[in-house]
Each structure stands twice: as C-alpha cells, then as structure tokens.
Amino acid sequence: MNKKSVTLFNKIFCHHTKKDADHCIKIKIWDMQLALCSRCLGLYPFSLTWLFLSLSYKIKLSHSFEKNFIIYSLFPAFLDWTLTGLSVIKSNNRIRFFSGLFASFGLARWWYLWIMQNHMDIVLEIGRMYLIGIIVVSLIIFRIKVVSK
C-alpha cells in the first residue's frame, strides 16, 4: 500500500478527528500504520459473522423477543457513544470494542430481518428510533462544541 492508500484506509476505518484518534486501535502491518475504530472493529466483522450464521441456519425468533433483543443489544454502544460525546464519561477502547461487539448481535438480526423481509415493522421502528436518537444527540454535541468555542 502506498501512502495515499494508507491515508484513505485510515479515513474510512478510523473516522475520528486527530483529537479523537485515541478512539482507534493502531495496527502495524509491514511498514504501514493502520488505524481501526475500536467500536467498528467490534461491530462490523462480528455483525457479518452473526448475519451469515442467521442466514445459514434461518434462525427465527418471536416478534416481541426479536424487537427487544435488537433494541437492548444496540443500546450499550449508543449509550457509550452518547455519554462520551456529551463528555459525561471518558470511555476507552476496551469499552468501545465490547459495546460494538454486543451491538453486533442486534445489528446482525436487524440486517437479517431486512434481508428476509420478516417483521418489517420492527426494522422500520428501530431504524426510526435510532436515527432520531443519533440526530438529537449529534445536534446537542454540535451545539455544546460550538457554544464552548
């Protein structure tokens, strides 16, 4: 990989500012220093694994259990992201990784429901709920950072 490729890789997989670069895990491969977001490292590879297993075995859960399972497994990552963004707590890479890992179960089930067209009401409801939450928290964080400057 040349320097431009490494820079592009780091921008995609460590989507933090230089100030928040400690949110990433640094991995040295040959002479390259690659940065991976800690939460995403726990979230995406494991989500794809759980999704593959769900699709392979066509795992079905009840409507109410499915909804609660997805909400509660995504919540710790959302809570950690929110509280860290609002500077209420100081998180670390271990917490970020494990909250991402825990969220990977719910994200995989959410994707599974979407792909299989099962319980689309759950898919849309959870999507709206988290989207609204992310927008509200982002606006609050942005407002806090703008006002504090």
Image (cartoon, rainbow, N blue to C red):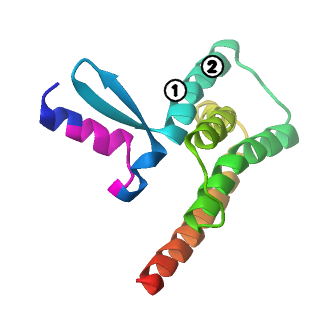
Can residue 59 be seen here? The reply is yes
Q: Secondary structure at mark 1?
A: helix
Q: Nearer the viewer, residue 11 or 54?
A: 11
Q: Amino acid at mark 2?
A: Leu
Residue 109, compared with residue 95, is above or below; it is above
Q: Is residue 12 left or right of residue 47?
A: left
How many marks on residues?
2
| Whether residue 93 is situated above or below residue 17 in the rendered picture | above
Pointer 1 residue:
45
Residue at horizontal 37 percent and vertical 39 percent from the top: 13
Q: Earlier in the sequence, mark 2 or mark 1?
A: 1
Q: Amino acid at mark 1?
A: Pro
Q: Residue at x 33, y 42 (%)?
A: 12
Please name the predominant secondary structure of the magenta segment in the image. helix
Instruction: Decide if residue 128 is in sight here.
Output: no
Q: Is residue 46 magenta?
A: no
The spot of residue 19 in percent (x, y) is 38, 58
**Percent position (x, y) of residue 113?**
66, 35
Query: Which residue is tagged 2?
Result: 55
Q: Nearer the viewer, residue 66 or 118?
A: 66
In x, y percent, where is residue 122? 72, 48
Farthest top residue in view: 56
